Image (cartoon, grey):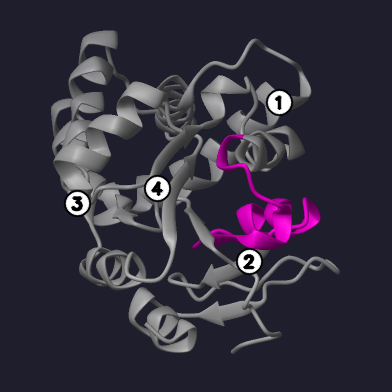
Amino acid sequence: MLKDNLDSVTTLTFDIFGTVLDLERSLVPPLDLLLMNCGAPATITGKEIWTHWRLRQRIEQYQDNMLMLGHSGYLTVKKKALMYTLRSHKIPFTQAQMDDFMEAYQMLIPFDDAVSGLNRLSGKYKLAILSNGEQHYLEYLAQNRICIEFDHILSAETVGQFKPHPSVYRFAMKKLNSEPQQIMMIAAHSFDILGARHSGFRGAYVNRYDLPYDESNYVPDITTGNFYELCDILGV
């Protein structure tokens, strides 16, 4: 679905966690192993923990922003959210087990359509990562897991706030030397599109998870299910 003419857009900024990288496919198998090693009941699966863990991650990030906790960092927040989720299910664990599990974040798998789509889009647009991940971690993922050469890799860590804080999008505008209407945010999470649209960006909501968009006036310009459809809409 295309809302308006997008001829002003020259740069695409991408969320990568859950949009380009398939977190569920990457993390549920090591979650199953973690649960077994922790002696969790067989009725509790990695997929079930993943569902609750995802929701807790957003709360941890919002708390970090609102309480000005000094920006804990993406990987730290994910670990804290997992610990909370395991405790809520009465599953015992050790810090060593948590540290071992977090190594799974070094082996994240990209969606096939995302890699294909990024290659197609690079022929028409400048591509930039705009992510809550740490700078060094994003550079590692771009080179070793996504294997795409981005024009820019921008981390919320530099700002000290997690998206969707407006300062992250203002930082991107400055680093990209672009007006907001020249930038389109691509994300599979409605909060990210909401934050970008609020800051004047154009927005493409890749609704991989068949979830409703937030009740807001800051709606996406494009809503699609995957990168193949996105590329077709953008004519690449």
Which residue is found at the position 66% from the left and 36% from the top? 174
Q: Residue 121 sits in which quadrant?
A: bottom left
Marks 4 and 2 sit apart, C-alpha to C-alpha, by: 17 Å
* Disc 1: CA contacts within 10 A as few (<14), some (14-19) or many (>=20): some
Residue 181 covered by magenta stretch = yes
- Please name the amino acid that badge 3 sits on: Ile
Marks 4 and 3 sit apart, C-alpha to C-alpha, by: 10 Å
Front disc: 4 or 2: 2
Q: Secondary structure at mark 3?
A: strand
* Disc 4: CA contacts within 10 A as few (<14), some (14-19) or many (>=20): some
- Which callout, 4 or 2, points at the residue further toward the start of the chain? 4
Residue 73: percent from left, percent from top: 49, 20
Proximity of marks 4 and 3: CB atoms separated by less than 8 Å: no
- Please name the amino acid that badge 2 sits on: Gly
Q: Does 11 sit left or right of 230 as displayed?
A: right
Front disc: 1 or 2: 2
Q: Between residues 135 and 59, which one lies in front from this camera angle?
A: 135
In the picture, the quarter occupied by the C terminus is bottom left
Which residue is found at the position 68% from the left and 43% from the top? 164
Which residue is denoted by mark 4 in the rendering?
17
Marks 1 and 2 sit apart, C-alpha to C-alpha, by: 23 Å
- Please name the amino acid that badge 4 sits on: Phe
Which residue is denoted by mark 1 in the rendering?
65
Proximity of marks 3 and 1: CB atoms separated by less than 8 Å: no
Give the residues in magenta: 175-201
Residue 53: tell me if it is visible. Answer: yes
Which residue is denoted by mark 2 in the rendering?
203
Which residue is denoted by mark 3 in the rendering?
109
- Which callout, 4 or 1, points at the residue further toward the start of the chain? 4
Q: Secondary structure at mark 1?
A: helix
